[in-house]
Amino acid sequence: MGKVLFGLAVMSSFLISHLSFANNPLNFGSDIKTADPSGHVWNDGKMYLYTSRDEECQADFWMKDWHVFSSENLEDWTAHGPVLSLDDVTWADNYAWAPDAAYKNGKYYFVFPAGTGHKDRVNPEKSTKWMGIGIAESDSPIGPFKDMIGAPLWKDPYSNDPSLFIDDDGKVYLYVHAQEHDYHVVELSDDLRSVKVELQKMDMGGYEPKMEGPWVFKRGNYYYYTMPENNRTLSYYMAKSPKGPWQYKGVFMEQEHNANNHHSIVEYKGQWILFYHRWLKTPESSCNSLQRHSSAEYLYFNNDGTIKPVTRTSNGVKDFISRTLQSK
């Protein structure tokens, strides 16, 4: 009896410690500062997060590489290191910002923004900053990725924050945040190495606030165009087509610290998850400022398909294991 009780105690202790291991922000096992998490579930059944990386005390979002992490339970993450670096890109040397990824034709595709120059916030007319969007390919979801075309998909307009969406019919759509070209979409070629037509302006139903970091996904019969409205609150539109016309539905996550918030939304093992970044004090940092950290929350829908409001929590998705066990 004593051995049985001891065994139960050990098992109970393991389960408690395991279920309480994760936190919000997500624990990647190091003090790496990540942002703009793009979540994807590939054929191996794992969740992959493709992120940008904030350098310690960086100047004005001067960022140099992108990272990838994988998990089977959203609690224990494996860091696979940089998936791509600006050292591997011949046409840019800065601004390794919010990425995205896709799988098609037996290949993994990594879409990334990068640029050159300097943004003069005091005297904007003196700015030389430019950004474009590149496509890299790999046989593995963790790379190494290679910039196959050695150039951005286009040079004008200045563009960043790409979101890739492959529809059920195999067509590839790229949504971007671009200079004077927000709420635009472009269809890519089947090999994702070129654009079929120029950027196309979508019908947003008459409401087009300032935005960045779009994310598009499909659930049931509806397409969702989600974004940081005014670069702060997470808002969304719904449509019956990947190009709209779109109908604005409102805010589903309020802002925090008057700071930007990039995100992704993906279903994993029966649960819809919102990945996003938080601006938080980092005790071990040499910078006395808020820094970005990838985080996650559960996301729920109403019966009509609209998204329920999401509140930031300290627990995030740390009970994901128990939830998935209960749903079996």
Image: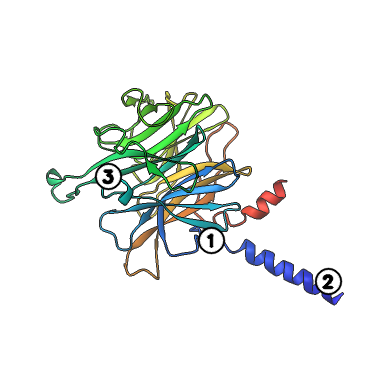
| Disc 1 residue crowd, few under 14, some 14–19, many 20+, Cα 10 Å | some
Residue under label 2, please give it: 4
- Can residue 115 be seen here? The reply is yes
Tag 1 secondary structure: loop
Residue 226 falls in image quadrant: top left
Residue 264 position, x and y percent, is 47, 43
Q: Which numbered dot is residue 254?
A: none
Tag 2 secondary structure: helix
Q: In terms of depth relative to the viewer, which is nearer, 191 or 265?
A: 191
- In this rendering, would 125 be left or right of 274? left
Counting residues from the start of the chain, the first of labels 1 and 3 encountered is 1
Residue 173 position, x and y percent, is 42, 29
Q: Residue at x 55, y 47 (%)?
A: 47
Residue under label 3, please give it: 90
- Can residue 211 be seen here? The reply is no
Amino acid, disc 2: Val
Residue 221 position, x and y percent, is 56, 26
| Badge 2 vs badge 3, beta-carbon distance below 8 Å | no
Residue 178 falls in image quadrant: top left
| Badge 1 vs badge 3, beta-carbon distance below 8 Å | no
Q: Residue at x 50, y 45 (%)?
A: 141
Counting residues from the start of the chain, the first of labels 2 and 3 encountered is 2
Residue under label 1, please give it: 23
Residue 294 position, x and y percent, is 45, 54
Amino acid, disc 3: Thr
